[in-house]
Amino acid sequence: MGSIQLREVTKAFPKSKAAAVDQISLEIADGEFLVLVGPSGCGKSTLLRMIAGIEDVSSGQILIDDADATNAPPKERDIAMVFQSYALYPQMTVAENLHFALKLRKVPKAERIERVDEVMRMLRLKELESRTPGQLSGGQRQRVAMGRAMVREPAAFLMDEPLSNLDAKLRIAMRSELARLHERLGVTTIYVTHDQTEAMTLGQRVAVLRDGRLQQVGTPQELFHEPRNLFVAAFIGSPTINLVEAEVRGGSLRFGGHAIPVPAHARLTDGATVVVGIRPSAFELAELADDAAPRLAVRLEVVENLGDELHAIFPVDAPRVDVEGAVDVEQAGDEQLLVDERALFTAALAPRRPLAPGDEVELAIDTSRLQFFDPESGLALAGSATGEHEIERKVHAG
Amino acid sequence: MSTQTVAGRARWAPGSAARIGRRGRRVAVWLIFATLAASTIYPLFFLLSTALRTSEDYRRAPGGLPHELTFDNVQRAFSEMDIGRLALNSLLVVVPAVLLLTVLSCLAAYALVHFEFPLRRTTLAIVAALMALPPAAIVIPIFKAILDVNLLNNRLGLILAYAALQLPFSIFLLASFMRAVPGELLKAAMLDGAGPLRTLWSVVLPLVRPGLLTLMTLNFLFLWNEFLYSLVLLQREPERTMMVGIGQFQGHFDQSLGIVSAGLMMSMIPPLLIFFFFQRDLARGLTTGALK
C-alpha cells in the first residue's frame, strides 16, 4: 500500500510574501506514477520535500496510506527519495550505500544481504559494489541512487529531477528504464521535473504547478488536448502550442490577415476577442489535407528537418501571446534571438516534400483541434477542443 | 664603425638592464627568504647545539658549533628536571582537553551549520568574535571560576579551562568544514532512518576527517605549548606541566641552560611526531577547507 493524499497543503517561508506551495490538494493512488511538473521555482520540489518530511508543512494535511503523516518524522513515513544530486554517501562504497538504510532499520543481516544483492543484480550494480560514488559515472550514480531507494522496499518513491544531471541521450535511455522499473515494481511514485517531455512520457497522471498553485492534474492526453488554461497549454507540448489573438467576426476567426471559419464545436460570441491555440501537429501541407480544411498561405522563415518530422516556422502578422513562465527553465529568456513582435508559428509536418526557408506554402488546419482561451483570464473557453465541461472547470480554476 | 657600435650598444642595453633588474629582484627576494629562514633555523640550531654540548664547550663559543656531542644534558633533564614526569603531566591534561574540545566543537559546529534555530547566525558571530579574545584577558575570571568549583590544582580544572579557551576557534574551524557537507546528504540520511547523532557519526564526521585531524593537531600544539593557564591553575609541583616545569627549573645558570635546552628539545618530540603522522591530512585540512 502506498496511497498519498494532500489536503490543502501550504508552505510559506518566513521571508517570502507569496506561499511557495499554495493550498494544494491531490490524491495519488497506490501504485500510481504521478509527475509534478512546472517551471523553476513553482514549488514542486518543496511539495515533494514536504511529502518526504524534510520540509515542514505550514498548513494542510498529508496522509500516507490514510494515516496522518503531516508531522511524522521522515523515517516513519516509509518513503524513499531520489535526489537531483543523488546524495550518495561519498565515503561509502556502492554496497555500503545500499546497506546503510537497512542497517539503521535493523533488518537481519541475511535478509539485508539478500535484498541488496537482488537490487544490485536488477540494476547491474554488482560489478560496481566496492567502488565509491566518486569512481562512478553519472549514469552509474543514478542507478545507485535508485538502488538505495529500492532496497528499502518503501511504500512510495519520491524522485526530485533524478535525470537532470545526465546527458541528453542517457536521460532518454534512463527515462524508459524508469518506466519499466515502475511497471515491474508497481510502487507509488511521485516524480518532479521541469521537463514537460519527461512528464508526458513518464506520468500516468501529470500535475502542472505554477507559482505554488496547482494548475491542472490529468493524464498527459488530457493536459495536451484539454488544457485548463493558457499556462498549461503553453507549457505542455513540444514544439510549443501556437497562440494568437483572434477576433470572432461573421463566423470566422480573424488574425494577422488570415480568416478561418469558427469550428462547429466552438461556441464563440460574434465580436469577441479570443486567444486561439493551434498545436503544431494540427497543421498539414494543403496538398495532403482534406479539401474542406481551411488553409493558411504562409511564407516559411525557418525549416527544421528532424528526419521523420519537419518543423516549418513562419511569422503571422499579429502580436505574440506570451505566457509568463511557460517556457522551459533551460530556455527561459533564450527563446528569441532577434527582436520580432510578430507571432511565430510552428507547424509540425510530415516531410513529404522538401521545404526551404522563403518557400510560399499553403497549410491546412485541423480546426477540430483548435483551443480557445479568454485573453483576460487565460482560462480555456467553452467550445474549445476541451469540450463543454470546461465551463464548469473554469469556475474552479479561478 | 663607431656609429654601429653605439647603435649596437643602444640595441643591447635595454635587454641587459632588464636582465640585471630581474636578477637583482631575484637576489633580493632570495635574501629576504634566507633571512626569514635563518631567523627560524638559528634558534633551533642554538637550542639543539646547547642541549648536546657540555657547559664548558658552550662557554667557549656560545653561538658556534659544538666540539663534541654529548647526551649528558638529556640524562640530567631526566634525573634533575624529571622531564619524563613533566611530559606525562602535560599529556594527562592536553590529550583529554583535545578530545573534549573535539567532541564539543563537533556537536556545536554540526548544530550551528546544519540546524535551524533562533539566533543561529548571532551565535556563530559571537563564536567568531570570541576568537579575538586574548587568552591572558580572561585568565583571572577563569581562575576565579575554577577556584569556585574547587578545581584549582586539579587536572580537570585545567582541562576545562583549556576547553573553554579553545572552543571558539575549534567551532569556527570545524564549521567551515561542515559547511562543505551538502545538506542533501543529511536529508538522505534522515530518510534512510538516521537520527541527528547517527547522521553526524556515519555521514558528516567521515567527510570532515581532514578538518578533525587539523583541529586536533592545532589544538594539541597550542595546548602543549601553553604556559600561562597551566602556571596559574596547576600550582603544585607534582602536577606541573612540561612548559611550566622547564620554565621554572632552577639551577646554576651555566649548567641549567644545557638542561633546559635538552628539556625543550624533548618537548618538541610529541608535536613533531604528530606532524609526521598527520602531515598529509593537515596539509589537506589547512589548504582546502572544503570537501569536493
Image (spheres, coloured by chain):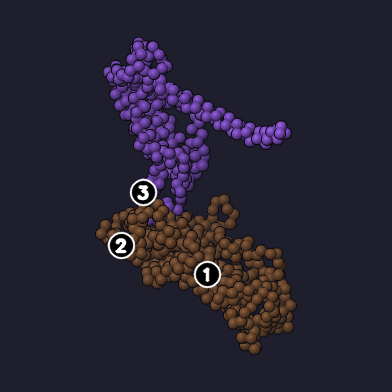
Of the image marks 1 and 2, the number of the one nearer the N terminus? 2
As measured in the structure, the alpha-carbon distance from the residue carrying label 3 to the one carrying label 2 is 22 Å
Image height of A82 relative to A180, above or below: above
Q: Quadrant of the N terminus of chain A?
A: bottom left
Q: Secondary structure at mark 1?
A: helix
Which residue in the structure is indicated by mark 1?
A197
Dot 1 and dot 2 residues touching (CB under 8 Å): no
Image height of B94 relative to A140, above or below: above
Q: Secondary structure at mark 3?
A: helix
Residue at the image point whose x is 44% and y is 59% from the top = A138
Q: Position of residue A142 (x, y in %)?
A: 42, 61
Which residue in the structure is indicated by mark 2?
A117
Residue B285 placement: quadrant: top left
Which residue in the structure is indicated by mark 3?
B202
* A173 on left or right of B20: left
Q: Residues within 10 Å of mark 1 (few under 14, many from 20)?
A: some
Residues behind callouts 1 and 2 on a single chain = yes
Q: Secondary structure at mark 2?
A: helix
- Chain A is shown in which shade? brown
Chain letter matching colour purple: B
